[in-house]
Image (tube, rainbow, N blue to C red):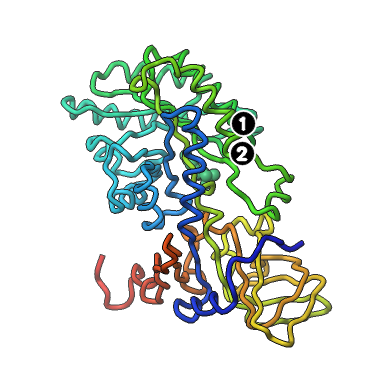
Amino acid sequence: MASNVKRKYTFNQLQNWLDRYGSPLFVFDVKEFKDNYFHLLDSFRAIYPKYNIAQSYKTNYTPKICSLVKEYGGLAEVVSDMEYKIAKNVGYSDKDIIYNGPIKGPMMEKFLLDGCVVNIDNLKELGRIINLAKEHFDKELRVGIRVNLDIGQGFVSRFGVDPDNGDLEEVLSQIEQYKNIHLVGLHMHIGHSRGVQYWAERAKQMIELADKYLDFIPEFIDIGSGMFGVMDPFLAEQFGGSIPTYDHYAQAVATVFRQRYGHLPLDKQPWLYTEPGTTIVSAYMYLLSKVYGIKKIRGKNFACIDSCIFNVSDMCRIKKLPIEIYSNGNKKRENFESIDLVGYTCLEYDVPFSEYSGEIGEGDIVLFKNVGGYSLVSKPAFISEQCAGIMINEDQSIELFKRKEKVEDVMLTYVTKGDHNE
Ligand SMILES: *Cc1c(COP(=O)(O)O)cnc(C)c1O
């Protein structure tokens, strides 16, 4: 099972980058990212023009990528005070930040006062917002409600407010009592439901909910994330073969919005938001890693590579990521029927790719595809520091987006003897 997509690089090109920035190395392709971003945007806008993308920061908050999204006119979707601050550093104004998440940080109140939309997840949070509204009756607080829907996902999600047990009515009636709390939108997000049928269900149920509970047209309806992105055939095969395109999703969702709101003047139509993370970033980030050596133990073959499952991303524990192996021309390369690519950690389960069949040898470079989601941002400084990342700009120039970490970076927050800083 090897990927047969045309190779993008040459060994020498990749080796030059590794010589300059170290190995392993993340590589982000701006042109491919941009094309994909606008493909998603245009698919929806062709049917329902008031659509926009709110980039999920938790998936990958690389500032240079967030800046690109900002430049393309996208919004920032954050779920913590930390992510909010990253969005502010990128240059976002509060009106273009959506604050979600089950436990919002102590700065939520400040953000609300600044004009950021907070999507209420639970009654406890509503209490905080009401307290704020009482203290600042001259300020307009803009809120949405995250609702918890059953779209056939087959499990009970823990996020949002239940519309069926009276909680949603409770939130709505409490909000109504405060003139300065403005309900401006509805939000939902359910994981593990990437199929088009779930998206059709999201659109239908959210519009029904808005019609049932609101006596006005909301400013936005946000239906979260979890779409399949553009995918290498090797990966698509593992998801059952036929992966829907953005046009399929747009047909299922934007059409429903157009039917319900299309007759209204544009400024009265609600914004339709989705919150892609993995969908927009994953396929356009690669990880390069050198083969350190080959090892054979009791009939089992191992290629030791200088990265680990935490660099490569959690995804490699569930699926086999598409890889390309670039040869350095080593004469001793062997053809293996099955060889595990194993990482630098001391964990037995650190196997970024299992049962590879094909040629591989010491000094080769392994290029992992689809590593842009939950990789950079969830890599602990476990055993070794995080590596560097570069981006290939549209004009083909190379730019560093993250330098390699140093041991000093890792030690920065640990208190050592004689160090009394807090
Ligand atoms: C995780 C998450 C996203 C991003 O999901 P992806 O599947 O990575 O695109 C968007 N919105 C919310 C509320 C999330 O929790």
Task: Decide: few, some or many residues near mark 2? Use Cα within 10 Å; few <14, some 14-19, many ≥20.
Answer: some
Outermost residue, left side: 138
Secondary-structure class at tag 2: loop
Seen in the picture, residue 245 relative to 317 is either above or below; the reply is above
Using residue 345 as the reference point, say whether residue 88 is left or right of it.
left
Outermost residue, front side: 395
Residue 392 seen: yes
Task: Decide: few, some or many residues near mark 1? Use Cα within 10 Å; few <14, some 14-19, many ≥20.
Answer: many
Seen in the picture, residue 193 relative to 365 is either above or below; the reply is above
Q: Quadrant of the N terminus?
A: bottom right
Q: Quadrant of the C terminus?
A: bottom left
For residue 254, which numbered disc appears in the image?
Answer: none
Using residue 244 as the reference point, say whether residue 46 is left or right of it.
left
Residue under pointer 1: 198
Using residue 315 as the reference point, say whether residue 59 is left or right of it.
left
Under mark 1, the amino acid is Tyr
Under mark 2, the amino acid is Arg
Seen in the picture, residue 345 relative to 118 is either above or below; the reply is below
